[in-house]
Image (cartoon, rainbow, N blue to C red):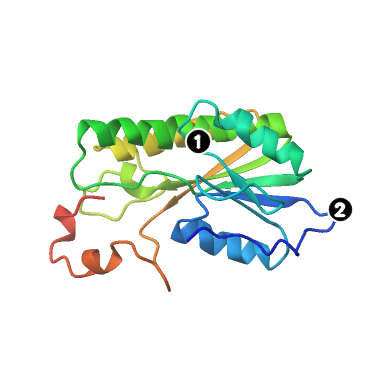
Amino acid sequence: MVYENSPSISAPETQARIVISGASGWLGCTIADQAARMHRSIALDIEGSPSKSQLVANLASQDSVEKLLMQYHEHELKADTFIHCAGLAHRPNETDSIKKAMWAVNDRGTARALEFCERAGISKFLYVSAIAGYDWTKETPAKETDILNPKTEYAKSKLAGEERTLNAPIDGRAVRLATVFGSGDKANFLKLSFAGDYESSSF
């Protein structure tokens, strides 16, 4: 389901809003819902109709930045924060086509999101990364300061997007999330919870 604000609700003129990419995903939709309660949400996804409350573009496409800028200015939007939830999740079997898609979305898509923010005057960028880059062969729990050792293309592409974020000319920050779940989530938490051997699970 693509999250959209009610067209009758708009943010106060003096209050900057929050762009949330991946707004049809569970995490993006949940964050957009919370932001909408403060009348601050601008959903971004690959489907829908551009409006005061929604931007539409596929960040994996080369023309996505120009499309976003056109919509952003056409609807006279004003945002100061971009929360980048959009991304291609891990797959048990990383075929060549899936690997290419992961780099197109997680790495280059992040670069385009950052370019859009810089050109639109959005000063703060929060990148939703993952814990997949840690070395899970160790017997001790991972710490944020541990040396990263990504094994999969998913992990490598997510960390590449993270590096782009931290080196961007705007205020870019990253959060490395573990499995996220909750009401309405259609992800694989139940499958993971019933997996007898977590050490052999593919993150």
Residue, x 86% and y 53% (percent of image)? 14
Q: Which residue corresponds to mark 1?
A: 59
- Residue 115 can be seen, yes or no: no
81 vs 188: above or below: above
Residue, x 32% and y 40% (percent of image)? 155
Q: Position of residue 80 (x, y in %)?
A: 72, 45
Left or right of 151, for residue 86: right
Residue, x 25% and y 54% (percent of image)? 140
Left or right of 125, for residue 108: left
Q: Position of residue 135 (x, y in %)?
A: 26, 43
Q: Secondary structure at mark 2?
A: loop
Q: Which residue corresponds to mark 2?
A: 14
Looking at the image, which residue sits at the far right? Answer: 14
- Residue 106 can be seen, yes or no: yes
Looking at the image, which residue sits at the far top? Answer: 62
Q: Amino acid at mark 1?
A: Leu
Neighbourhood count class around disc 1 (C-alpha, 10 Å): few under 14, some 14–19, many 20 upward:
many
Left or right of 58, for residue 114: right
